[in-house]
Amino acid sequence: MKTPTEQLALEVVVPVYNEQELLETSIRTLHAYLTAELDVPWLITIADNASTDATLDIATLLTYDLDQVAILHLDERGRGRALKRAWLASTAQVVAYVDVDLSTDLRALPPLIAPLLSGHSDVAIGTRLAASSRVTRGGKREFISRSYNFLLRRTMGAGFTDAQCGFKAMRTDVAARLLPLVEDTGWFFDTELLILAERSGLRIHEVPVDWVDDPDSRVDILSTATDDLKGMVRVTRGLLSGRIPVDRLYAEFGRRPFAPPQPPSFFGQVVRFAAVGVLSTAAYALLYLLFQSVMTGFAANFLALLLTAVANTAANRRFTFGLRGRARVATHQFQGLIVFGIAWLITSGSLLELHAINPQASAGTELIVLTFANLLATVLRFVLLRVWVFRSERRAAPEAEPADAPVAYPALEKVSVS
């Protein structure tokens, strides 16, 4: 392998796992395109993450046959792990990656990297969801992609349009600061990277792409979707708790005044409240069945609802409405208990009505009636929590600092890559 004698401008990483059928054709296609279309020094790195077929052997032969092609071998699987390792080790000005199937038309590569090389932007992504993008794929994948990105925008306030398109780039100096904060090593890597970049005030440039679905894709949609949802919950917790120090990146790279993460939108609050409500309802049902065996139905209902109400208020305070710290915790719980009292009247009233209609109602019938009554009470709880319990905190939220206001932050240590 021969590498450019000049300072590398671009390193394109191609993460692969058991791609012996596609690898040679794709790398030669990519190499030919870069040779013909780019007039800056570049390098292709094949990042093999623990392939068990002939992928590594083919990649090794390609490094001997083609100039400006290198290989990075990892003993562990994970696309995110391979990208993180390769990008952190790069000496280029800009790092990028493309999927090995080359589903994205390579003509989008020059406009992807241009704003990064100029310093105008920090991260660049291809988007299949722009009006001018031309995409060929099945209806199922189209629906899943749009639903996932819609969920990101509504629950996490994401401003980017397409989190999972396998066509991204970023400035290497930014990567050195941002990548150590990214924990995922699989398919959620892209989404986590973009969320943290956006929350750090980095400028994300989007390029409409032409994209053709790979019919032989081996991505497990259900498993990937489950991991993505878990990742969203983990990142949300990290941002709300301050464990992910995106404010420090604001001090160094932020292109707009620092403001703490905004609370979820109304839709996001509904989704989060519903998730908490489902768990609370399930916990309530289990507790009711447990208590009902040793006490009356009214007492069991009261105690089960009381315990789940306290936990529900705490969970909604932190997860749904984004409030942290101990300030006004007791007040919120007191107000939550008042809301609980209203909910208890609804559920107890339904139980009284049931016994008035059917005095011999079984425990199972009581449980069904109380479950539906509890769901109604849950809706009322959301309204009261939003417009009464946590309303003052939303009004009292501090405004963002003006653009010229000096803000002091602790220094962020550079990452050393061996």
Image (spheres, grey):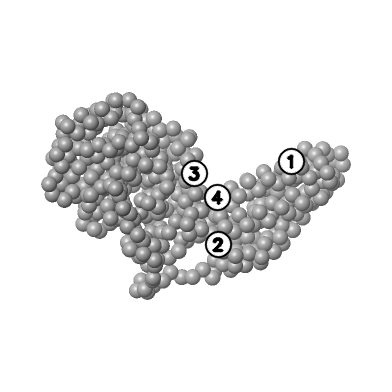
Q: Earlier in the sequence, mark 2 or mark 3?
A: 3
According to the picture, the residue beneath numbered tag 3 turns out to be 229
- x, y percentage for residue 238? 48, 54
Q: Earlier in the sequence, mark 3 or mark 4?
A: 3
Q: Confirm whether residue 242 shows in the render.
A: yes
Q: Earlier in the sequence, mark 4 or mark 2?
A: 4
Q: Residues within 10 Å of mark 3 (few under 14, many from 20)?
A: some
According to the picture, the residue beneath numbered tag 2 turns out to be 324
Q: Secondary structure at mark 1?
A: helix
- x, y percentage for residue 346? 75, 53
Left or right, 353 with reference to 207:
right
The Cα–Cα distance between marks 1 and 3, rounded to whole angstroms, is: 30 Å
Amino acid type of the residue tagged 3 in the rendering: Leu
The Cα–Cα distance between marks 2 and 3, rounded to whole angstroms, is: 22 Å
Amino acid type of the residue tagged 1 in the rendering: Ile
- Relative to 96, residue 315 above or below: below
Residue in the image at 32% along x and 25% along y: 53
Left or right, 322 with reference to 170:
right
According to the picture, the residue beneath numbered tag 4 turns out to be 271
